Image: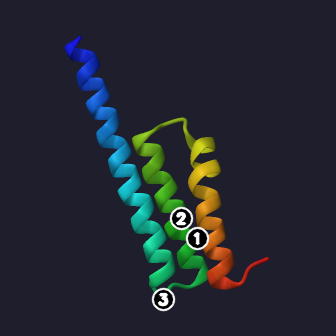
């Protein structure tokens, strides 16, 4: 029982960290004066951090955060 609580707490902590990283990345993409190449590198680094926290969840990252970051890049850099 205690192990389940610890596992749940650890999962919640990883989720909070993931959210902070993704929110920070989105804020940097909008606010920092980055080249498109630098912005794409920032997104790739965020993906790497997400996979460190949640291995084998790359497809989930792409669906949730990848689309969020693509929209930001499209709007900021006028991509088609």
Is disc 2 placed on a helix, strand or loop?
helix
The residue wearing badge 1 is 40
Is disc 1 placed on a helix, strand or loop?
helix
Question: Looking at the image, which residue sits at the far right?
Answer: 80
The residue wearing badge 2 is 43
Task: Count up the numbered dots.
Answer: 3
User: In which quadrant is the N terminus drawn?
Assistant: top left
Which class describes the residues within 10 Å of circle 3: few (<14), some (14-19), or many (20+)?
A: few
- How far is mark 1 from mark 3, CA to CA? 13 Å
The residue wearing badge 3 is 33
Q: Position of residue 33 (x, y in %)?
A: 48, 88
Q: Is residue 39 left or right of residue 23?
A: right
- How far is mark 2 from mark 3, CA to CA? 15 Å
In the depicted structure, whether residue 68 falls above or below residue 8: below
Is disc 3 placed on a helix, strand or loop?
loop
Q: Position of residue 47 (x, y in %)?
A: 51, 54
Q: Is residue 58 left or right of residue 9?
A: right
Which class describes the residues within 10 Å of circle 2: few (<14), some (14-19), or many (20+)?
A: many
Q: Label 3 near label 2: C-beta < 8 Å?
A: no
- How far is mark 1 from mark 2, CA to CA? 5 Å
Give the numbered dot on residue 16.
none
- Residue at screen point 29% across, 25% down: 7
Q: Label 2 near label 1: C-beta < 8 Å?
A: yes
Foreground label between 1 and 3: 3
Q: Label 3 near label 1: C-beta < 8 Å?
A: no
Q: Is residue 12 left or right of residue 80?
A: left
Q: How is the image coloured?
A: rainbow
Q: Position of residue 3 (x, y in %)?
A: 24, 16
Name the residue nearer the viewer: 68 or 58: 68
Which class describes the residues within 10 Å of circle 1: few (<14), some (14-19), or many (20+)?
A: some
User: In which quadrant is the C terminus drawn?
Assistant: bottom right
Q: Earlier in the sequence, mark 2 or mark 3?
A: 3
């Amino acid at each position: 029982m205690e192990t389940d609580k610890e596992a749940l707490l650890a999962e919640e902590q990883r989720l909070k960290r993931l959210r902070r990283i993704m929110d920070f990345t989105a804020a940097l993409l909008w606010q920092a004066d980055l080249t498109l190449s630098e912005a794409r590198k920032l997104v790739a680094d965020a993906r790497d951090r997400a996979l460190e926290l949640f291995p084998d969840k790359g497809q989930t990252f792409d669906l949730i955060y990848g689309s969020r970051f693509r929209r930001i890049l499209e709007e900021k850099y006028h991509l088609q």
